[in-house]
Amino acid sequence: MTSKRLLGVFAVLIVLWLIVPTLVIIPMSFNEAPSFNFPPKGFSTRWYENFFTDPNWLESLFVSLQVAVLTMLVATTVGVLASLGLSKVKFRGKGLLEGYFLLPLIVPGIVLAVGLYSLFLRLDLLGTLPGFVLAHTIVSMPLVITNVMASLQGLDPRLEQASASLGGGRVRTFFSITLPLIAPGVTAGALFAFVTSFDEVILSLFIQSPNLQTLPVKIFNSVTQTNDPTVAAVAVITMFTSVIVMLVAQFATRKRKRPVA
Amino acid sequence: MTTPTFTEGDVSTRAIALGADPKARSRGPKNWRPLLLLIPAFVIVSLFFLAPLGDVFVRSVTDPQPGLQNYEWLFGTPANLNVVLRTFGTAILVTVVCLLLAYPYAYLMTIVTDRTRNLMQLFIMMPLWTSILVRTLAWMVLLQDTGPINGILAAWFGIGPVPLIRTTFGVALGMSQVLLPFMVLPLYSSMAKIDKRLLPAASNLGAKPVTAFFTVYLPLSKPGIFSGGVTVFILGLGFYIIPALLGSSKEIMISALIQQQISVFLMWGQGTALGIFLLVCTILILVVVSRLNKNGSLFPGVDR
């Protein structure tokens, strides 16, 4: 019993270590003093005002949201198609093909970033919206595919066959039978894609241009070059955006019952 | 929403559902058609993942002129070997720290109630939802010389500012915090499969708790240790943001060296050679480990 209690105390300490350090950003963003310090002195919302009145910060927020939404749409559409294809065929080397789509998860980010920088330099895609979306799609799509594949595994093939036997065409069957059944996996995958894009730093750092920067790039540049506490307010905003999106994703997958068979 | 399921005993209904001749359905000329659905993903991954990596490789052997001089530079410069050793050392340190912290946590997850387990899992997942950048920013503030940790050390123990930021300690602290979930989740999933009656059985046979742990429990949890360790280690090798912000310029790791060679010195050949070296190390580790660990998947981080 005592050893279990000891483990409990240890686990609580781990949780505190994981979560608490990040929370210091919140009081810091309301710091009155124009310095980067904790504990903060006084209370002020000036850094939030700064953020919402500075066209540069707002511009990068807008770029980030735009890139994240477009990445979500592209990665989810292409990822769902690929998952459907993979689930419907059986052949040798299918595992390899599946692995091919998931490879971007294990390749060091910096190596891919350098490669994309080199390629985009030649294709004139540096600091462009399509460039950001394509780069982010590469690292988001594996998450869509793993989530959708998991949903498809729990799908009873008889339902699609029943639909087909009742005269439902392929497209009709997909939209009225398959898609609603795998919706939790698709939703979770899409939200993962959104957050991955919204938080992505390394690739964005390499493919940025002075005219087009995502919010994390701007945060990184601000942290390394200036001492502007506005970045704390920005960090809080991005933190809440991703946490809310991920809570929704968690909720979406929770509803999915695990198949028994 | 419920997903309809069938059990093994349902064979007859399955046979009916599949129609009179199931084989006719799965063979036939239509079988290749779903492959068309793979085309968009295949094109995107080929053009914007494989091609850039190919580009990195080609640059490493052609820039500024064809030959292996970039690799000669990589292995012939003592400073580079230091960076490589430092990177591997840091990744090993972080892996060990994560293992020591995650093991008891994951074990506790296997012996608590379902509700507590869900909560423990939520706490482990939650940090993954906050960007690495925001968390690193928080550590920068906490660890700085005038930060709260040094404030407490000065007020309570009278110790002058201890260098925390711009040290290996700071980098390892930040990296372990980010990578811990990747250790806990595989550890938990392999521990959950261990029969709980084995430890009492071992003690019935006269084993002390420590002996029982090392001879029974630890070997059975090996798959989790393997896949968690490999994931943390290879992710740790490629870290860029945390060493860049919490480390010092004197102690850079491979990723930062790559960035420096390319963005600062415009030495494409040398930077890309380092990139290929990092990539090859990652792949080699994965291949070796998946060979050693027969049940292990080649993508240990995928089920995150």
Image (cartoon, grey):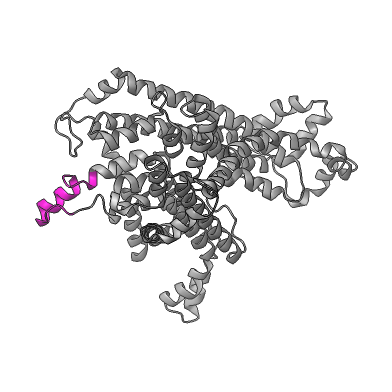
Residue B289 higher or lower than B13, as above or below: below
Q: Quadrant of residue B244?
A: top left
- Please state the horizontal and vertical placement of residue B139, each as a whole percent of the image: 28, 45
Q: Is residue A31 left or right of residue B112?
A: left
* Point 49% across, 30% down: residue: A132
Q: Provide the residue span drawn in magenta.
A: B142-162
Q: Residue furthest bottom?
A: B206
Using the image as rendered, state which of residue B240 and residue B93 is in the foreground.
B240
Q: Is residue B155 left or right of residue B279?
A: left
Residue B40 placement (x, y as % from top left): 66, 33
Q: Is residue B145 magenta?
A: yes
Side (left or right) of B89 relative to A40: right
Tell me: residue A58, above or below residue B174: above
- Residue A175: give x, y in percent of width and height: 69, 26
The residue under the point 74% across, 24% down is: A172
Nearest to the observer: residue A4 or residue B253? B253
Say which residue appears at 27% left-offset and 54% top-offset.
Answer: B167
**A187 displayed left or right of B238:** right
Residue B113 visible, this angle: no
Q: Is residue A230 above or below residue B241?
A: above
Can residue A164 be seen in the rendering of this structure?
A: yes
Query: In terms of depth relative to the viewer, which is nearer, A235 or A5?
Result: A235
